[in-house]
Amino acid sequence: MRIGVIGAGSWGTTLALYLNRLGHEVTLWAYEKELVEEIHRRRENSLYLPGVHIDESLQVTVDLEEAIHGKKAVLFVVPSQFYRGVLRQAKPYLSLNQAFISATKGIETGSLMTMSQIVHQEIGRIPYAVLSGPSFAEEVVQGFPTVVTLASQDMEMAGALQKAFASEVFRIYVHDDVIGTELGGAVKNVIAIAVGICDGLGFGLNARAALITRGLYEMIKLGVVLGANPMTFAGLSGLGDLILTCTGDLSRNRTLGLQIGRGTSLEEVTRQMKAVAEGVETTRSLKRLAERHGIEMPITEQVYMVLFEKKDPREAVSELMTRTLKREWPRTEV
């Protein structure tokens, strides 16, 4: 299969490498001309995936037309806040006969749209799928066993992609809840920042487990209001990804929270990071989505105040612990 991968960060490069190793004809697009030149020269993406050899058979380009035209499938792996801009540049080369697969986790800050909503607004009803689930790029590129979800309203296409992309080290499940899969991948990054902050404060494993569990509840509440199947959040793109991102040392969002909990400012942490921690901007989006729909998301709200209003993290945890006592699962809710 001829495949274009748009975005040469760690995850985009990893997916391109993986699909190339399966025998697909893959072209990877990168925004940075210098990065493309380095890959051509050294066969390595030292900025986002250092130490990993990129085979000569994997094509790399700065030309979107070259990466997209004539491909049977196009994977978009662009940070959420740049997604629409790159999509508009790519639009002239996209075809309604192509499978469009999004592997981006986030919500656009201005519009509060998920990636599928952006794609349908900008492109129309192109065959769309979202790839999500617990999958650190560093482990996938090493061939460690990984299991993910591919969600699409077009189950025939999803089944074809499942067969084409799966292997003995990369198992794929399919289902049809696109919005739930996208929300799970976005919300978990915010909860991972909260867990990182808590760990940075040294508050222990009990607190970590509580944040993960109540974070899942916030994910479900928002998802159901936006039309998702609540069972989606018990799956790989919900609970699975939440656990990985909140507990794994490779998690950028947990690492960011950890440093903030230890007293480093958000500005300093982001200055030191090479790759984007999607949870920072997603925190803004989730807070506004919760307000728009009248949903209480206390963990998200406290993360927002710590990140953007310079609230003391200890005070944020204290407020979470002293909120009004209530039922764990109100009868009127999910």
Image (cartoon, grey):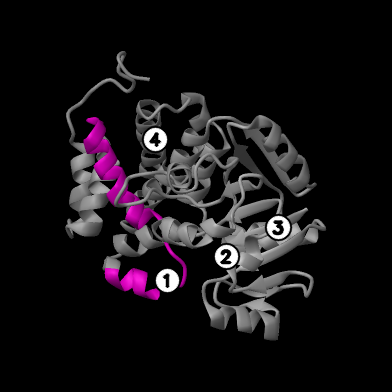
The majority secondary structure of the magenta stretch comes to: helix
Q: Quadrant of residue 299?
A: top left
Q: Position of residue 101 (x, y in %)?
A: 60, 48
Q: Residue extending furthest front?
A: 92
Which one is in front, 98 or 276? 98
The boundaries of the magenta stretch are 267-295
Q: Residue extending furthest right?
A: 23
Residue 289 magenta-drawn?
A: yes
**Residue annotated with mark 1:** 273
User: Crowdedness of circle 2 by 10 Å Cα count: few (<14), some, many (20+)?
Assistant: many
Residue type of the residue flagged with mark 4:
Met
Which element type, helix, strand or loop, lies under badge 4? helix
Which label is found at residue 219?
A: 4
Q: Position of residue 59 (x, y in %)?
A: 72, 71
Q: Report, in whole angstroms, how far the alpha carbon at label 3 lies from the one at label 4.
A: 38 Å
Residue at the spot 17% in from the left edge and 56% down from the top edge? 311
Single out the mark in the foreground, 3 or 2: 3
Q: Position of residue 274 (x, y in %)?
A: 46, 72
**Residue annotated with mark 2:** 10
Which element type, helix, strand or loop, lies under badge 2? helix
Residue at the spot 23% in from the left edge and 40% down from the top edge? 320
The reply to whether the C-beta atoms of the residues labelled 4 and 2 are less than 8 Å apart is no
Give the answer, above or below, for where 20 lies relative to 172: below
Residue at the spot 78% in from the left edge and 75% down from the top edge? 56
- Quadrant location, the C terminus: top left
Which label is found at residue 70?
A: 3
Single out the mark in the foreground, 3 or 1: 3
User: Crowdedness of circle 4 by 10 Å Cα count: few (<14), some, many (20+)?
Assistant: many
Residue type of the residue flagged with mark 3:
Gly
